[in-house]
Amino acid sequence: GAGVSQTPSNKVTEKGKYVELRCDPISGHTALYWYRQSLGQGPEFLIYFQGTGAADDSGLPNDRFFAVRPEGSVSTLKIQRTERGDSAVYLCASSPKTSGVLSGANVLTFGAGSRLTVL
Amino acid sequence: DAKTTQPNSMESNEEEPVHLPCNHSTISGTDYIHWYRQLPSQGPEYVIHGLTSNVNNRMASLAIAEDRKSSTLILHRATLRDAAVYYCILNAWTSGSRLTFGEGTQLTVNP
């Protein structure tokens, strides 16, 4: 597609439930990023993939959060046993392959986000 | 990751130029300076980036200090649609373009 697509746009769930959020990146972009944004704050990095593998998952807050990208395209962020503090907008971004010194010039394209509300 | 400092908020009038400052005194030689903006209820949107020289594109201009410890995003004629949070971010090649966002500058544009 022309942009990064995220589904669902809104998700309301109950505390303790399992949630999946999907990201469909720009075709051909090998790098994919997940961020979380709480109200009034800047986006907070969670994890990024280079192809199918997680190149950096240092931002995942705990083991309830997990993300996969099995075929190097679509990615799913999975949250187990949701808590009220997980309520936020979850943003996905993609970019062309990143490597080498010039990768500092790499530009990310973000989706509109998935708003998660845990009651 | 090298840190950036921006004012929390700024205000401008429509059709006037806006200069959004950013300090990044700990920038390293290979860090690129990026600007993104976020309109209400949308994901961040790329605006412009540069390394050492000033840059212009259809959205804005980026002026980079000679010592690279600060930069300024310039919107030449602000419109109401430019009202957004503007983020100044250093993109280090060692981070795999994992951008670290601060709280940004909330720009208000008055009609």
Image: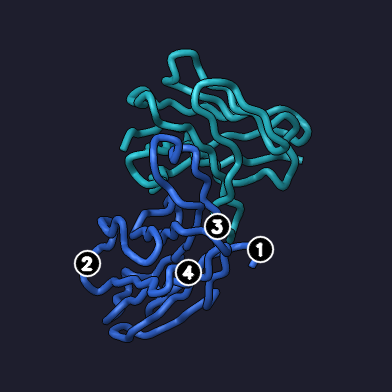
Chain colours: A blue, B cyan
For residue A12, above or below residue B67: below
Quadrant location of residue A72? bottom left
Front of the two marks 2 and 4: 4
Q: Residues within 10 Å of mark 3 (few under 14, many from 20)?
A: many
The reply to whether dot 3 and dot 1 touch (C-beta < 8 Å) is no
Residue B68 in sight in this render = yes
Chain of the residue where label 3 is placed in the rendered structure: B
How far separated are the C-alphas under marks 2 and 4? 24 Å
The reply to whether dot 3 and dot 2 touch (C-beta < 8 Å) is no
For residue A69, above or below residue A36: below
- Locate residue A39 relative to residue B15 in the image: left or right: left
First in sequence: mark 2 vs mark 4: 2
In the image as oriented, which residue stretches furthest toward the left? A63
Question: Does dot 4 land on a helix, a strand or a loop?
Answer: loop
| Residue for badge 2 | A62
How far separated are the C-alphas under marks 3 and 1? 15 Å
For residue B20, above or below residue A41: above
Are labels 1 and 4 assigned to the same chain?
yes
Rendered image: mark on residue A73: 4
First in sequence: mark 1 vs mark 4: 1
How far separated are the C-alphas under marks 3 and 2? 24 Å
- Amino acid residing under circle 3: Gly
Residue in the foreground of this view, choosing between B86 and A35: A35
| Residue for badge 3 | B43
Q: Residues within 10 Å of mark 4 (few under 14, many from 20)?
A: many
